[in-house]
Image (tube, rainbow, N blue to C red):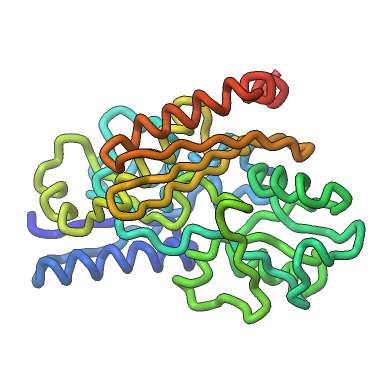
Amino acid sequence: MNGITIATRKSRLALWQSEHVAAELRRHAPGLEVELLPMSTRGDEVLDRSLAEIGGKGLFLKELEKALLDGRADIAVHSLKDVPAEQPEGLELGVYLPRANPADLWISASATPIPALPEGSRIGSSSLRRISQLRAMRPDLETVALRGNVETRMAAVSEGRVDATILAAAGLERLNIVPPSAIAMNSPDWLPAPGQGIIVVQHRAGDERVAAWIAKLGCDRTHRQALAEREIVRALGGDCTMPLAAHAEIEGDRMVLRGRLGDHDGTLIDAQAHGSVDRAEELGSAVARELLENGGRELLARLNP
């Protein structure tokens, strides 16, 4: 069999990412037949509750992973920030495509920065990571649960249902819908989700045919950033709903890794490590250990009583 079937969610952004992977596969292997298998997931369907309430971001993956395991698809394309630290039996993460902009964007109708917002302004977000960092800066702001695709959340701002929201830059840039009023929220003042901006390809463990096709799409620099950031998640025993932020910056052969753990009230614990890019996972372990030693154990106990 010379073709590859890609399992993908049906959202506009997910389809863009999968089409991008398909185009890269065709570019590296002219004549390769690539088709998409769009699927609906529970994470897309249940929008009236937070992800933490219904099982975490892994709900965006389960139907796609079933399609891999039963042979309906050969690969699945995910946003790495949605992928739990531990892989299901029989599946593995194959390659990490070159990272896009990892930053968050502040989206408001009038381009009003966070410090200038009137007291009590309504901010739409269901991300505990974003809410914890926002409350550390402005505890007087009101946060309103807001889920859905990027277009839905931007519409909540333009229609006046909330005064502002926070979205990943990579998604808006990929769809070419960054509003002129957007304000970048950059590291180290504001940290993104671990793996934010990275597209990852998942496949069946031991499938050498597929592994050979997708190997050409990988980026070593991005892979090392992913290893470092996701090791913090793994070491803390967390998932994609934990209010954890992380960002690995690489210059030459050196990496600076920052991690931030927060709670619902705006308490933040920071840690960082630096060293050779070859020690990416060690740096992740070091950051996780520092977070725990500096109050992270007690914070996590409060979050998960």
Looking at the image, which residue is at 52% across and 33% down? 239
Looking at the image, which residue is at 55% across and 47% down? 43
Q: Position of residue 233 (x, y in %)?
A: 48, 33
State whether residue 279 is above or below residue 247. above
Q: Is residue 184 left or right of residue 2?
A: right
Q: Is residue 83 visible?
A: yes
Counting labels gives 0
Task: Check the picture and name the quadrant holding the N terminus.
Answer: bottom left
Residue 35 placement: quadrant? bottom left
Q: Is residue 86 left or right of residue 30?
A: right
236 or 160: nearer the eye? 236
Looking at the image, which residue is at 23% across and 54% down? 218
Residue 119 placement: quadrant? bottom right
Q: Position of residue 108 (x, y in %)?
A: 74, 71
Q: Is residue 237 visible?
A: no
Name of the residue lying farthest toward the bottom: 180
Task: Check the picture and name the quadrant holding the C terminus.
Answer: top right
Q: Is residue 16 left or right of residue 20?
A: right
